[in-house]
Each structure stands twice: as C-alpha cells, then as structure tokens.
Amino acid sequence: MGIQQKALPLQFTISSSSKGYYQDSNQKTLHLQHGATHVPEKGGAGRWAWIGLFAAELWLGFHCLLSLLLRWNIIYRHTFKDRLKRYEHDLPGVDIFVCTADPTLEPPILVINTVLALMAYDYPTEKLSVYLSDDGGSDLTFYALLEASDFSKHWLPYCRKYNVEPRSPAVYFRSVPKSIGGDHAVAFASIKTLYEEMKNRVETTTKLGRIPAEIRAKHNGFSKWDSFVSRNDHDAIVQIVIDGRNPNEKDIEGLTLPSLVYLAREKRPHHFHHFKAGSMNALIRVSSEITKGQIILNVDCDMYSNNSQAVRDALCFFMDEKKGHQIAYVQFPQRFENLTKNELYGTSLRIPTEVELHGLDGCGGSNYIGSGCFHRREAISGMKFSKDLGIPKRRQATMEGSVEELEEKAKAVASCSYELNTQWGKEMGVKYGIAVEDFVTGLGIQCKGWKSVYFNPERPGFVGLAPTSLSQVLAQQKRWGEGNLQITLSRYCPLVYGHNRISLVHQLAYCHYNLRAVNSLPTVYYCTVPALCMAAGIPLFPEVSNPWFLPFVYIVVAKCSSSLSEFLYCKGTAKGYWNGQRIWLYKQTSSYLFAFVDTILNLVGLSNMKFAVTAKVSEDDVSKRYEKEIMEFGVSSPIFTVLTTLALLNLLCLAVGAYKVAVEGWWTAVLETMALQIWLCGAFVLINLPLYEAVFSRKDKGRMPSSVAVKSAAIVGLIVLYFCNSQCLSADLKTVFLQLMGEKRTDLGASV
Ligand SMILES: O=c1ccn([C@@H]2O[C@H](COP(=O)(O)OP(=O)(O)O[C@H]3O[C@H](CO)[C@@H](O)[C@H](O)[C@H]3O)[C@@H](O)[C@H]2O)c(=O)[nH]1
Ligand SMILES: [Mn+2]
C-alpha cells in the first residue's frame, strides 16, 4: 500500500530533565573534602578506619555520580497505533520465543498460559509464530503444548469476539469480568469449562511425572523421547505442533492459527549449553529455517502478554519512516503480578522501570532486559547497522517445504556441534559467557550502530512472576550482580568496547549497572567499622559542634528524602520504600559480595558460571507468609550467615554504645563525638528488625535456621575477640578513653 501524503510519524518522544539531583552530589563533594582534609595523624586513633571510610566514600560518591546520569535526560515515548493501518498489508512476520528450563520450577500449565496469551495477539495470525524452547527437554511440557494447541482453537476466536484482556486464560479467569451477560456469559461459561478441563489434564500428568501410555499413543510426537537419556543428554527435538499453512489446522471459526513450534535443542554432557543464551541462539536459527519472521519477540516463560496490542506498539517504532530503520530492539518493562502491597522484597523494579530505563534511553538507548523485548532479526543475529536495510516489512518467502523437511533442517541447526568454530555467542546472536546475557547482548547491538527504544505504556505489555522468598531474591540478584561485573572485567567493558561506538555518557551510564557488585565492599565496610569503632569509643565523623557536621547531616537527609520522594512519585508506598531500603542493604552486603568473590574466582578459573533458575511456584505456607509480608528465611544459606552476622554485630555494638551512654555516664561526650555513628548503627539495627525476629522469636518454618544463627554468633564472637586484642586498637582505645576522662573533650574531634 502506498503512502499518499507525507506520512505522519508513528511514534513521538518527549524528554524531561531532572537536573535538581546535582545538589545531592554537590554535598557529597563537601563531604569528601572533609574526609580528605581531616585524616587522623599517624598513630592517631582510628587512622586506618578513617582512611578506609574515606576510600568507601570516594567509591560510593563516584557511583552516585553515575546514577545521576540515569536521571539526567528522562525520555518518554508514545505510539500512534491507528496510523499503522497504512502498513496493514506490509506488516512483517513476528516470531515469538518463549524459554523454559525446568518443568518443576516452571510448571507446564504456567508455560502454556504464556504461550496462549502470545498466540492471541491482535495481529494477522498467518504472520505470527510462537516457539517454545524447552531446556528441560520434558515430554510433560510438550504434552502441555499439545493441549494448548487444541485449546487455542477455541480461545483465539473467544478473545477476538469479545475483545478480552488479558489473554492469558489463567489470569483472565482469575479476574472474572463483572459486566458480562447474555451471549457472552454463555460463551464465558463454556470456554471456562474447557480451560478447567485442560488444566486438570495438564496438572495431573505433571503431578504424575510421566505421560500415561494412552496419551502417548495418541500423538506420535512422543516417540521423539524414545532415544532420550536425560535432560542433559538427548537429540534435538523439533516439532511443528501447528503448521499455520495447513488447511486442517484452523480455529473453530475456520481462521488460520499462528504456527506453534516445540524445540528442545540437542544436549550432551560434555558440551556446555550456555543456558538461556544458548537456547535463544538455537531459536534464532530454528526460526530462520521455518517461519523467518523479521521481528523476534522474546519472553521468559512466566511473562505473559498483558496487552494484545503490544506487537503493534512495537511496530510503530520499527516502521516509523524517519527513525524506524535504526531501531534494533524495543524493550518493554518487566512487570509482576504477584507483588505485595509494600513490596516485601523490593521486587517491583519500580525505580529501574519508572526512572532509570527511561534515563538510559535518554543517554543513548535502553539495555535489553531479557524478557518483553522485540528485536529486529538482522540486529540480534549480529548484522551491523546499515541504512540500506530500511524498515522491516513483509517478505514474500515464508514457510517453504513440508513439515518433515522443515523439522529436519531445524534439527540440524539445533545440534550441539552446529556452533563449533562459528561466531555464534560472540559476534552473532546472544552473547555467551556472561550471566546477564541480555545486558551484554543489548550493549553489543548498540555498539554495532543500532539504536534501541524503551517503551513503557500505561497498560503493561508483559507481566510475570517475581520471586517470593528472600533466598530466591538474593540468588537472582547475585546472578545479576555477577553478570554485570563479568562484563566490566571482560572485553565487553562499556568503557573499552563502547569506546568510539557509543557516547561517553552512554558508556558511563552502563557502568552504573556494571559496577554494582563493587559497591558491596564499601557497604560492608560501612556496616561494620563505624559500629565497631563506636563501641570502642573511636569517633570517625565530625562531632556535633563542628561545622563539618552539617554537610554530613545534609547528605543523609538529602539522600533519604530524594530517594523517598522518587519512590513515592513512582506510586510506591512509604513502607514499600522502607522494605526496599532493607533489600538494597541485603543485596549489597550479601548478593553483590558473593557476586564479587565469585566473579574473581571465575576469572582465575576456580569457579564456573551458573544460572540458577528462579522458581515460579512455591509451597503453600511460603506463599501465605509472602502474602502476609513476612520475610522468608527458612534455608541454611551462606548468604543468610553474612546477613545475620552483620545484624548481630551491629546489635551488639549498639548495646555496648547504649550501655556506655547510660551507665558510664559519658553522655554528652558520646553524643557529641559519635552521634553519626550511633545513628548509623541504630538505623542498621532498626532496618534489621524482621531479621532479629526471625532469629530470636519466630517459630514458623520461615524463621532463620538455628544453624545459621549459631554460625553467625560464633563469627561475631571471633570479630569482637580480634578487635579487642588488636594492638593498634588498644592503643587507640586508650587514647580515646584518656581523652574522654580528661579535660580536653572538645579537642577530641580534631585529634582523630
Ligand atoms: O538454562 C536455562 C536457564 C534459564 N532459561 C530460561 O531463562 C528465563 C529466565 O530465567 P529466570 O530464572 O526466570 O531468571 P530471571 O532472573 O527472572 O530472568 C532475568 O534475568 C535473566 C538473566 O540473568 C534473563 O535471561 C531473563 O530474561 C530476565 O528476565 C526463564 O524463562 C528460563 O526458563 C533457559 O531457557 N535455559
Ligand atoms: Mn524470571
């Protein structure tokens, strides 16, 4: 279809700057200046503690500056879907990739709900294909997909006719619309029954753990599992479950169905499979043998489509006449349906999705966050940007050949050996060797000259499941922190790899994420040394009467109030903010600390990269506690030992401090010299209240395991012993005590 007049743009962008944040960093500079000019003399009390604190300050100050970049130029984008009509006959093919890895952690019924929602996009069905990659290689998942293909024959016409949202059946039936009546009510009842029956069948086989013989006999697809040894040792399985061209595979209204393909790439024990990145690359190749869609949408198996218009939204960017040819990917935010009111674990990603990704977009382009992202096939396959490629439009060639031929060709490219001596995982496809394959792949694409878009519409495009226990949350954060640090230490470090390819601001903005794991060291320092020094009577910050005290107070107040107002502005609750601060602290002092250590071990070859899949289901009692916003510890993990140790140490230090204040009667001196340390230690104790409760008073299964508590108490004991015996410290202590008891109280701040 030609475009008569000058075409109106399909999308537009507005930007708003939030440059007020600079005040915060100005104060930080003052703060640092004090640190630099007030180092205690040699032999002075706490000289090393002071120097360490100054180094920690320097690092955190630098990281704070990086975070400002993400707030400097915030970009919001809008689309005009109605104008896309001018391309209605030229719309490109869209191949959708869903990845799953484990039928226990990711139940087949959840996976097929995602698949069904994606199949039901408002998009020409002959141009839509859904691929399910199953790294679990499970016939249970395959069976569920067969069931979904049958159910889709009813579900798609229903969605079309009544224009329902969302189109994940499970979510739709859970949020039963109130206003249906007449004809629709009858259709609703009958489709619901069909769904319930299917769900029962799928859940029964899942529970059973195997496919009963009578079901197996009905579909010869199951014969592909005859040679199956284990999930890590099997041939490639490719099955075209629905061939969109087949006249016999129509929905109940006689309309074409989207093509549906099951893939379990070949796995061998001696062949490293590169986790999700490996499965994405297999999907890129398999789909290029079968449907060859020019646009690829990638979602995690729990991220259902929540808006049937999202494909059209994305195409407004790709097909925009002026800028569309530059766009490599359109990233939607990841939203979650299972959040509690006050976001117990801070898993809403509120600030990243509402602020930072808009800001990164303003710095030059959003990163790829693994799910809910539309890619242009050429870009994700590794091609450099070239304006000659134009905007992605319908191509003539789609599926060619019989189903058997297509499956054979696809199997060949899904084999382990296919990638040997190729650029796959390096210059082609999703990159290997980094635990956040999405992040590094997005960066790589931008470095090849492409642009990207972050699109955050009012109605979320994709909604998934956030982890529901603290150990899962921290394990996920560890993977992310580790992956990001791996990037910094690899050849993909934004400052090196991005040099001359993306702008300096963009490189630095990326570094904000890539250096997160390093923050663990100064944070742990902050959570231990000031408290220990406080208990020992060594002041580290200026005393209350010192004019330098003010910048310190200001920075605390400014930092807290700006982050709180940002959080409230993004529609969070005050308690949610408080919970978020706790999780921030836990991430820094455990996930990122472990990530830091693991990355170093990985670098020297002492540890291997892992990808612990996040569970999408949890036991009943765990879910109940989650709904009541009670923190879930329960497992004996080294991560919890670190958290408990820090919490107990601070509690002890605060108790010692309080004892001195109350009993030893040096009230004014303590408060005068150590108000900030007491405040820091007190805030730390306050934020840890749920942890103390889990250690000391809870009786349920989610409490802190006693083995963790015992280990932590022992470590605290050792630290205190070491601290008390340390020679230099005793000298320090002596000086301070002498000074405290003598006349020269007011000189104290200056002497340390
Ligand atoms: O060997 C594997 C491991 C995982 N997955 C799939 O990858 C997806 C993401 O895994 P999940 O455990 O849910 O991790 P999250 O931390 O929630 O995922 C985020 O972070 C990952 C990188 O760490 C990205 O891959 C994801 O897209 C992004 O949503 C899921 O669909 C898994 O089935 C595989 O296909 N193969
Ligand atoms: Mn996930």
Image (cartoon, rainbow, N blue to C red):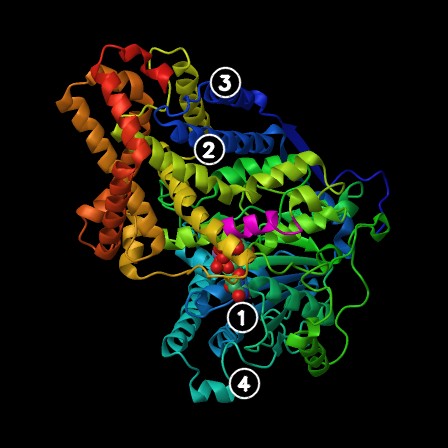
Query: Percent x, y for residue 329?
Result: 68, 50
* SS state under label 1: loop
Kind of residue at badge 3: Leu
Q: Earlier in the sequence, mark 2 or mark 3?
A: 3
Asked if the residue at tag 1 contacts the one at tag 3, i.e. Cβ–Cβ closer than 8 Å, the answer is no
Q: Is residue 348 above or below residue 269?
A: above
**In-front residue for pair 471/665:** 665
Residue span colored magenta = 481-492
What residue is rendered at 42% in x and 14% in y?
A: 548
Pointer 3 local density, CA inside 10 Å: few below 14, some 14–19, many at least 20: some
Q: Amino acid at mark 1?
A: Asp
Mark with earlier residue (4, 3): 3
Task: Give the residue at mark 1.
Answer: 135
**Which residue is located at x 48 percent, y 55 percent?**
598
Residue that sits furthest to the left in the current view: 663
* 242 lies above or below 473: below
Image coordinates for residue 190, horizontal then vertical, percent: 44, 67
Is 482 within the magenta? Answer: yes
**Mark 1, other Cα within 10 Å: few <14 / some 14–19 / many ≥20:** many
The first of marks 4 and 1 along the sequence is 1
Residue 563 sits in quarter: top left
Distance from disc 2 to disc 1, alpha carbons, whole Å, reads 42 Å
Q: CA distance from mark 3 to mark 1?
A: 53 Å
Magenta-colored stretch includes residue 685: no
Q: Which mark is residue 56?
A: 2
For mark 4, give the secondary structure: loop
Q: Please provide percent x and percent y for residue 457.
A: 58, 41
Which of label 2 and label 1 is nearer to you? 2
| Residue of label 4 | 219
- The nearer-to-camera label among 4 and 3 is 3
Q: Are marks 4 and 1 in contact (CB under 8 Å)?
A: no
